[in-house]
Image (tube, coloured by chain):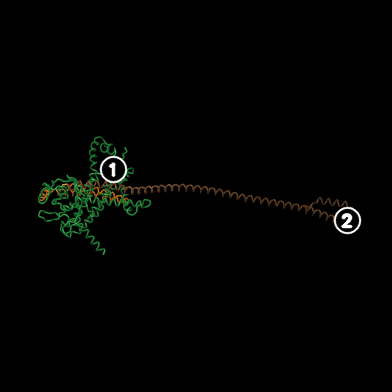
Amino acid sequence: MDLVTPDIGLIFWTTVSFAILYFILAKFAWKPILGAVNEREKSIKDALSAAEKAKEEMVNLKADNEKILNEAKLQRESLLKEAREIKSKIIADAESEATEKANKLVETAKIAIENEKSAAMKELQDTVVDLSLNIAEKLLSKELDNKEKQLKNIQDILDKTKLN
Amino acid sequence: MPLKLSRIYTSLLLLFFSANIFANPVEKLDGSKEFDVNEMIMHHIKDSHEFHIMDINGHAVSFPLPIILWTENGLVTFLSSEFDHDDAGKVIVKKKQQAFVKYHEKIYYAEQTGYLGKYVIYDNNGVVLNKKPLDLSITKMVFSMFLSMLLLVLIFVATARTYSKSKKGEPTGLGKFTEPLVMFIKDEVALPMIGEKNYQKYMPFLLTLFFFIWINNVMGLIPFFPFSANLSGNIAFTFVLAAITFVITTIVANKDYWKHIFWMPGIPVPMKLFLAPIEFLGIFIKPISLMIRLFANISAGHIIILSLISLIFIFKSLWLAPASLFFSVFISLIEVLVVAIQAYIFTMLSALYIGSAIEEHEH
Amino acid sequence: MSLIIFLQETLVDYGAFAAIGAGLAAIGAGIGIGQIGGSAMEAMARQPEMQGKLQGSAIVLIAFVEAVALFAVVVSLIK
């Protein structure tokens, strides 16, 4: 029975001791310790949320980047396409111009050749006329006396048999 | 020679332990002394007015403690050494025209005439009939309590100081050891039991309670001089701590708490009438169970260890010593775990009771 | 015959009854602790990842049950 009867003296001292211990520790130990712990936890929480935010921003940035990249790609593609079109156009233009020039050249050459030809023909005609005249004159002077009449006859014949 | 040194330490340790056991041989009527296990164990787990260290050649060496008495003639103080190790009511100390005598670690006003050399009278059941002054002495347990307070203040003020030194509030040195314990009380006791909203207010109380109980439990397990007092196995100590929890619970309790006790919502009226007295008794049973749990656990631990050691003396055989020592060391190791768990349970249940008193019900 | 003598002797000595009471409480507590320990082991085998939590709560529960036995010891201390 003695063992389970609380002793007044010890009750008194335990109460006093606990009260003193509580106030000393609460003021000089728990307050700074818990303050430091709470502050640290808060800073960790803040850091975590900041990291989360940064991550989110990063994701946003990535999305933006992708968008820009896509746009750039599209632009490049369109540029390339344009360039290709221009190139083919230039080539086609150059080709047609060259053909035109060549055609023209051929045309002028043809004309020149024609001119030359007709000039040569005429010269030849003249030469042949002269030659034939000479020949005829020589022939006729020997054979014919009516020179005038004969010349006219020869001219007629020559006109009918124009060289082609 | 580390082996030799450790052997010396071991024998010293055993000497202290055994010295405490030999402390109180029972004096029979014919003057012969016989070892009484019950007496020895009770002597160990009870309070004492002097701190017994060891016996040398049958002469007790003890640390005298101040005796403080509130008597009919006012405050009386003297050192317990004035009783000259007497605990049988044979030595009288006279102060302020009053005579005091110590019998079974209690101080009484001495009778005028002695009988068989004793200045106490008792009835047939052994109940002492002498009048008692109010005894506020610094007993062995009070001394032990002051020591534990000193240790706690030193440890935790030093811990607090490491935080101001370190950058970014990181624990350094001692804080690395103590902070996990503080965080344990915070995360495993206060937060789940009381809730995030209010726990900050009760943290200092819970921390003080936990460490106060724990350090005293541990100090009780160390079997030599400045320690070994069975303070947390004393019912007065556990009574005060449980009473503090009870007072806090009662003061902070909200309307819901009282409503749940006297008029439990959500059940039929006859049930309400039936439950009210049970719940009302529950208010008191909760702290009483707290008180008895700690007291019984720690006292039982001490009793078991001492009983195992006493087996050597009961059987009067040295051959039993290895087994006895082995088991007592084994139980001591278990006790190291038990004292921590008991401190945790006391704190956790205190937090639970406080939490249930301030809980907000939603219905 | 010896039982009667035993009873006669024990009736005088209340301490023996206290010891019997404490012993009975120990049986109850033993059964309780065994149940808790067994269930905890089973649960740990089923969910090894929960081992830490289960161990902690099992130890606390064992301490509760043990306290009941110690209540009986205290009652038997009150003569």
Question: Callout 2: 10 Å neighbours few (<14), some, many (20+)?
Answer: some
Question: Which residue carries the number 2 mark?
Answer: A141
Going by the numbered disc 2, the residue's amino acid type is: Ser
Q: Is residue A123 visible?
A: yes
Q: Which chain is orange?
A: C
* Chain letter of the green region: B
Count the marks.
2
Label 1 marks a residue whose chain is B
Q: Which residue is mark 1?
A: B354
Q: Which chain is brown?
A: A
As measured in the structure, the alpha-carbon distance from the residue carrying label 2 to the one carrying label 1 is 164 Å
Q: Is residue B90 left or right of residue B333?
A: left
Q: Secondary structure at mark 2?
A: helix
Residue B292 locus on image (x, y percent):
22, 46
Farthest residue in the front direction? B96
Q: Is residue B315 above or below residue B286?
A: below
Horizontal arrangement in the rendering, residue B264 relative to residue B32 (left or right)? right
